[in-house]
Amino acid sequence: MATAYHMVHYRRVNIEGNTPKTTNFETTCRTLLGEENSNGVALWNRVSDRVYSNPDVPNLEIVLNRVADLTSAVFGEMCLVDTNGLQALLQQSSTNVELSSITVAQIYDLEESAAPKGSKFIRGMVYWLAIGDHLFFVRTSSMTPRLIHAFFEWFSIGKTSGFTADSKLILQAEFNKSQISGDIGDIRKLRVSGNAVPQFEASIVDDAPKEVSTTKKVADRIVQFTQALPIIKALLGEEKTQSLVDSLGPQEYLAVDASVRVKGRRTSDSKAKLKELTNQLADLTDGHILVEGKGGKLSDNDAILRMSMPFDLVSEGASLLEFNNVADQLQEVYNRFVKDGLIEA
């Protein structure tokens, strides 16, 4: 059986609002899926009612497709589908084409085609497992944690059997306790390394109070040109930044290479902001996130609680994962985290 390694992401589900604390996320998912419509048909058997159209992402829908009650957990897959997209195709028919005044070459024709009637292109997948208030997921392609969060908010909040309409669903990333000694208030520095392109808002620098001795940047990663500009302007000023931009050659671009550092005595507000930043880091990168504590030692391993695992593919060369194997592997990660004391059962 062909396998592929994917990152298993972990989130703790927190519900803020007037929802009674007697229910957890797993139970709520199970109850919602068992909720019957006016014809007495449960949501388990109404796939068309498990389709979410995100108003912030035109022409894309999220479909909760296969979903199963495992007794000890609820497990499912979600598909990010393109409702009106085209797919580029390489036609296996060749033609001779004049490409310039001196070049005539034989090429294959390109064309863009819509999905066959009765089908839609899949742009991303996520496989997820809910146990208590623990959520584990594996995502592929264009499916992002923000889309996953948006779906679960739509799915669980304001429904008859769900959380109250005034509730707020938070998918909280956690630091790996085996990599961090002490609590989040002991952390003095975060560093990020990896190949993923960061998407931090430049306002984290622009809005920083000038009297506070705090620098906030992004570590060891290439920041896209347009995202780097506001940060460099904050450091160098408008005039010097423009002079630098004007001097760049056709193959040059601006990048930021730095770190997040907090100096001085920590407050409850700064701890809360660091926890919020943890979520942003976990959402935006699959690269390693390293931390430095009071002792100044930088951890050698990933600071975010997550784990890389092998998964069976449905066939050699496929991108889809084998449904039952994913369910087994996600439960294995849960059991390991509990056994190692990283989360509570």
Image: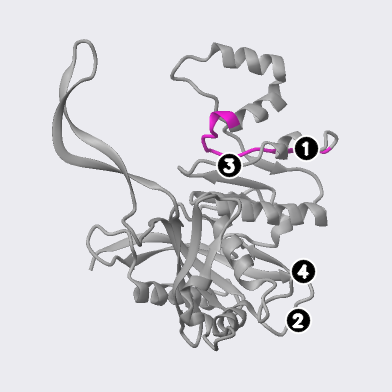
At label 2, counting other C-alpha atoms closer than 10 Å, the crowd grade (few under 14, some 14-19, many 20 or more) is few
Residue 330 in the image: x percent, y percent?
A: 44, 72
Mark 3 — residue?
Answer: 199
Measure the C-alpha gap from mark 1 to mark 4.
29 Å
Which quadrant of the rendered structure holds the C terminus? bottom right
Q: Are marks 2 and 3 in contact (CB under 8 Å)?
A: no
Residue 29 in the image: x percent, y percent?
A: 58, 78
Instruction: Point out which mark residue 221 bears.
Output: none
Q: Are marks 4 and 3 in contact (CB under 8 Å)?
A: no
Measure the C-alpha gap from mark 2 to mark 4.
12 Å
Label 4 or label 3, whichever lies nearer to me, is: 4
Query: Can you say whether 94 is above or below 308 in the image?
Result: above
Span shown in magenta: 212-226
Label 2 or label 3, whichever lies nearer to me, is: 2
Residue 217 in the image: x percent, y percent?
A: 65, 38
Mark 1 — residue?
Answer: 207
Which quadrant of the rendered structure holds the N terminus? bottom left
Measure the C-alpha gap from mark 1 to mark 3.
17 Å
Magenta highlight: main SS = loop
Mark 2 — residue?
Answer: 20
Measure the C-alpha gap from mark 2 to mark 3.
36 Å
Measure the C-alpha gap from mark 4 to mark 3.
29 Å
Report whether 203 appears left or right of 41: right
Query: Can you say whether 218 is above or below 140 in the image?
Result: above
Q: Residue at x 60, y 51 (%)?
A: 56
Measure the C-alpha gap from mark 2 to mark 1.
37 Å
Query: Can you say whether 99 is above or below 264 in the image?
Result: above
Report whether 21 appears left or right of 308: right
